[in-house]
Image: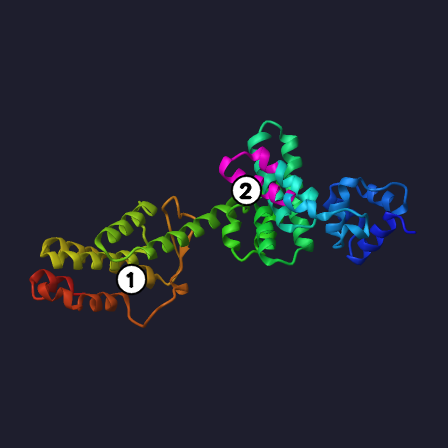
Amino acid sequence: MKHIGQKIKELRKKNDMTQEKLADYLFVSYQAVSKWETGAASPDLSLIVPLAKILHVTTDELFNLDTDQTDPRRKELDDLFDSTWKSGDMKVRYETALARCTEYPGDFKYLLDLAEAEEHYTYHHLENDPQMQKEFFERSVKHCEMILEDCTDQTLRDNAIEQLVSVLPELGRHEEAVAYARQHPRANDLLINCLTGEEGKKHRQAMLFHKITDVLLLLDRSLPALEAKEKIIQALIPDGNYLYWHDWLTGNDIWKAQHFVRRGENAEAFALLRSAKNHMREYEKVLHKNTPSAYTAPLLNRLTYDPNNVTNFGTNTPSENFLAYLSMPVFDKIRETEEFQEIIKL
């Protein structure tokens, strides 16, 4: 009759699993697994159910144990783990995550939760113990790598990469983090956390540029939204070297002017149209240079604006677009005034 170690070896090979990998999932040494398989020792009874789960068999094939008793335990652990998101108890979260992986090996969601809990535990309970912090970070990395090696669920794989990009820099392994980040669908977002030096600073500025653009696109053409856009751009570029943003400010001032025309506040409308014209002229200068221009504001001073890489939505020049906007019916009320006629002279 086969001893349990022989059965473990048979099932391990059937699942294309090394002794080292089985040991990792069970949180034991590979030497222990080797002793089981040679009959020199037997696994602890507490490992029978986890062994059956990870080897994808019933416990009857190992020992005659009732697996039904594990179902309430799983719910108990899940509920306890979930409760820590409200309580914020990182110690309980880590201990529960570890218990779930120990009792239910092979569950990649649990393994990811453990990897994240190991990182969070270091920040809250090991801040004065650098050596233990390093050990916990390394555990987190190892568990993420196990997911990438064996898990086929793409969402879990992507989440494991996010965790690696968060933890590897803590170990000084920035290049590895960058390599993982570039595999992720949101690579640019993840690279913020791991690029270093001048490359990292430039990437952060580029991401800021794009994120600010996304925010501005969310704002409509109501007067409060238009005023908010202007303030955001001015805060981003306080030195007035707007380059690309001159085009934004041109349109912004024209839309603001429309509100004042409707109110009958013509003086304010004319001032805004003159401002729009100035921004349009400055933007034309940038385009006519035909070479990249450098931003000088502190938050963007590692970026340039290259007119050769502009995506155009039509063949009109900035001047032609300016006149097209001012031909809209809303300006008919002031079209024949001396001030308006002066503004449209280009």
Toward the viewer: 224 or 10? 10
Q: Residue at x 33, y 59 (%)?
A: 286
Left/right of residue 241 with respect to residue 113 in the rendered view: left
Left/right of residue 225 with respect to residue 206 in the rendered view: left
* Residue numbers of the magenta segment: 73-94
* First along the sequence among labels 1 and 2: 2
**Residue 125, above or below 284:** above
Locate the C terminus and report the quarter of the image it occupies: bottom left
Dividing the picture into quadrants, the one containing residue 278 is bottom left
Query: In the rendered structure, which amino acid carries the disc numbered 2?
Result: Asp
Whether residue 170 appears in this view of the structure is no
Left/right of residue 175 with respect to residue 299 in the rendered view: right
Q: Is residue 86 magenta?
A: yes
Residue 152 position in % (x across, y down)? 65, 58
Residue 300 position in % (x across, y down)? 40, 48
Toward the viewer: 346 or 208? 208
Quickly name the residue at label 1.
Answer: 284
Residue 289 position in % (x across, y down)? 35, 61
Q: Residue at x 15, y 65 (%)?
A: 330
Q: Is residue 144 magenta?
A: no
Query: In the rendered structure, which amino acid carries the disc numbered 1?
Result: Glu
Dot 1: element: helix
Dot 2: element: helix
Figure coloring: rainbow
The number of callouts visible is 2
Q: How far is disc 1 from disc 2 in space, using C-alphas?
A: 57 Å
Query: What is the number of the mark on residue 82?
Result: 2
Query: Secondary structure of the magenta portion, mostly?
Result: helix
**Residue 131, above or below 149:** above
Looking at the image, the residue that sits furthest to the right is 1
